[in-house]
Amino acid sequence: MRAIQIVTTRLSSCLRPIRLEFVSSSSPQLFSNTRRLLCTAAATKSNGGRSGSIVAPLVANEEGEEVQKIDVNPPKGTRDFAPEDMRLRNWLFNHFKEVSRLFGYEEVDYPVLETEALFIRKAGEEIRDQLYCFEDRGKRRVALRPELTPSLARLVIQKGKSVSLPLKWFAIGQCWRYERMTRGRRREHYQWNMDIIGVPQVTAEAELISSIVTFFKRIGITASDVGFKVSSRKVLQEMLRKYGVPETLFGRVCIIIDKIEKIPIDEIKKELGSTGISEDAIEQLLQVLSVKSLDDLEDVLGGAGEAIADLKQLFSLAEKFGYSEWIQFDASVVRGLAYYTGIVFEGFDRKGNLRAICGGGRYDRLLPTYGGDDIPACGFGFGDAVIVELLKEKNLLPELGQEVENIVCALEKDLQGAAATVATTLRSKGQTVDLVLESKPLKWVFKRAARINARRLILVGKTEWEDGSVSVKVLSSGEQFQVKLNDLE
Ligand code: HAM
């Protein structure tokens, strides 16, 4: 017991409070366990409340047994989804799914764990440094996916000629990035993706943006809340060609340019210079990025080219789809992934408080980089975190309570079986039922009915049940009547 007192004192003097109860013995083993406890608790403190140790600290429970005290927080940057969070997540995902269905897309999924090589590209992307990767027990290098696009490419290549193009696929999957945590950016997030494989025309990008607009409208977000900045990587490609910069540098240059808002311009120039691009070309490249209208772009690029033609077509299609007021040309949008080749776009909040809401573009050369056929592709990713922040800001978060249509309760202990029969009958008719599984006073049952937003309370009482009936109370009106079990709908 003396040993415990010492530990308690030291814990309270230097760490956040940890409740130490009884310990079964005062053996020498206790002292080493105590030291482990202190070390682990120290790691817990320095880690902002999350344990940095593999071994959970040992504490004694009420019976005096030593048990491991786990940290009840999920790892930093990750989330639990308690029922109330899950309701919001399901609401959001149902909209993702419903929009995808409206546009005729098929749902796919891939493993969260993929081969690390799938995500290793040479262009110097930030996403590579954020990879959760490790060696598995079979000594294979694996990674938690940071995005879904490489997995999609892998599956398309695997399917080969067995699928007919174009493919229109959607997925909702958890992605992992070891990110610096900011508002709406986490280490784990879910992404809704819609992709079109096998369509080289801008009609594909135009339809993808239309599906995102459809989603926004469904959840109450308007064109005055959100917009899309659109550009084409072909703008940079045409500039690089003009200055004789080799095609092989394209991805790398795009990644450097994408960092413009994150690091000082001199750094950007230095990085671009290190690829071998001339100073003159760098100045021209940076200048073109400030262009905000297609007419000005035409002037800079010197007349028609693929970039201008694609963008003009996109803006014309936007009119036909009916979302012109949502999109604007902005040459500074390049995107941070190396594989994009054509149109790129990002959804942004017009108040400018949040990071990109969604983003995507054309990636015609990704499949060949994995050894697949040269099949054109484009798509987008839409995260589940930033949009919730925006909905909060706009007061548009839905109120989602638990919803069970009926609560069924036996009025006496020996009618528990009868209540089970009533619940089964209702469920077989498609009604949702919360069956009270213990003997509880009616006051408790009413409280529970209110909490789960039940529409009806069904009471199974002795006299009614002998007659094959139950008592039904409509909770909104207080109306009460008896119904034969067979007539219960
Ligand atoms: P991305 O821009 O890296 O693109 O991510 C797409 C979206 O995922 C972002 O706009 C944001 O909504 C969300 N997101 C990304 N990282 C985080 C994070 N750490 N925390 C919360 N949300 C995040 C891609 O991933 C591409 N693969 C999208 C794509 C699909 N392109 C073509 N098809």
Image (spheres, rainbow, N blue to C red):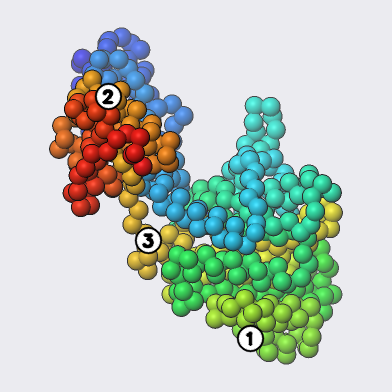
Image coordinates for residue 344, horizontal then vertical, percent: 66, 69
Image quarter (top left, top right, bottom left or bottom right) of the C terminus: top left
Residue, disc 1: 293
Relative to 12, residue 119 above or below: below
**Tag shown at residue 397:** 3
Query: Which residue is located at x 57 percent, y 50 percent?
Result: 172
Nearer the observer, 125 or 73: 73
CA gap, disc 1 to disc 3? 35 Å
Q: Secondary structure at mark 1?
A: loop
Relative to 60, residue 443 above or below: below
Which sits earlier in the primary sequence, circle 2 or circle 3?
3
Three-letter residue code for mark 1: Ser
Image coordinates for residue 407, horizontal then vertical, percent: 28, 38
Which sits earlier in the primary sequence, circle 1 or circle 3?
1
**Tag shown at residue 416:** 2
Does mark 3 have its CB less than 8 Å from ligand 1? no
Nearer the observer, 164 or 179: 164
CA gap, disc 2 to disc 3? 40 Å
